[in-house]
Image (cartoon, helix red, strand yellow):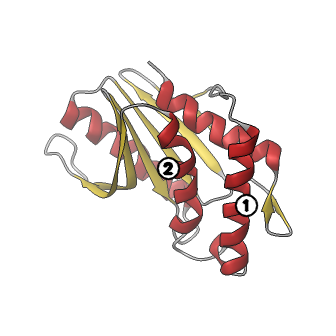
Amino acid sequence: MQVYREAVRLYASSDLQVLSTVLTWILKSFKGILLRMTDRTHLVAPFLWAVVPLVPNTSVSLDEDLERSRVDAPSHFDFVLRRGTKRTGVLVVKDEMFRNSLVRAFLGCEIIADIEYCHEVHAVVTDGQTWVFIRSLDEKILYDEINVLTFCDGAPDTTMLHQVVGKRQSMLMAE
């Protein structure tokens, strides 16, 4: 594995404000428990809502179980984004098992590459605060793990929010 830094695409400040407001509403509605509970999908889904409409010809599927005979273990992604030949799996960390989720994401990338004959598969592993971006290439795995979204009084830090959304968009736009 090799560390890399995903590019950050510019994201409109008005759209960023809408996303920030939605995340604040979610956290206030659940009184902050999403950061501690096992299902953080409610906190992660708005990031997809914010990015997918900006990237033409992108589709999203939910809860994909992955199996392939050549890869001897099953895997799962909470979301899979498709754009042309690009695939991005999104795995929401459950039960505070971040490292286990990373292993499942690496395995999921290998299975998608095998099933769909992709030379590059992306993944995002997150618990809603920490975001790890992965690029699984034919001969190497790249990861960008220094992305922590902080919240103050239920509102996300705008700079880090832009970084996470911009990297998410960059992965989808990559050719």
Q: Secondary structure at mark 2?
A: helix
Q: Quadrant of residue 81?
A: top left
Residue 90 or residue 49, whichever sits in front: 49
Instruction: Classify mark 1: helix, strand or loop.
Output: helix
Q: Position of residue 42 (x, y in %)?
A: 54, 67
For disc 2, the marked residue is 102
Along the horizontal axis of the image, is 175 left or right of 151?
left
Q: Position of 108 compared to 156: left or right?
A: left
Q: Quadrant of residue 160?
A: top right
The quarter of the image holding the C terminus is top left
Given the image, on which type of amino acid does mark 2 rest? Leu
Residue located beneath label 1 in the image: 21
Q: Is residue 31 above or below residue 170?
A: below
Q: CA distance from mark 1 to mark 2?
A: 29 Å
| Residue 102 at least partly seen | yes
**Amino acid on which the number 1 mark rests in the picture:** Thr
Residue visible at 52% across and 58% down?
Answer: 45
Residue at the spot 29% in from the left edge and 56% down from the top edge: 64
Lower position in the chain sequence, tag 1 or tag 2? 1
Which of the numbered marks, if any, corresponds to residue 59? Answer: none
Q: From the viewer's perspective, tell me whether residue 164 is left or right of residue 39.
A: right
Residues at discs 1 and 2 in contact (Cβ within 8 Å)? no
Q: What residue appears at the point 31 percent right and 27 percent down from the top-left corner?
A: 84
Q: Residue 70, how many percent across, how many down?
A: 16, 40
Whole-percent x and y of residue 163? 71, 38
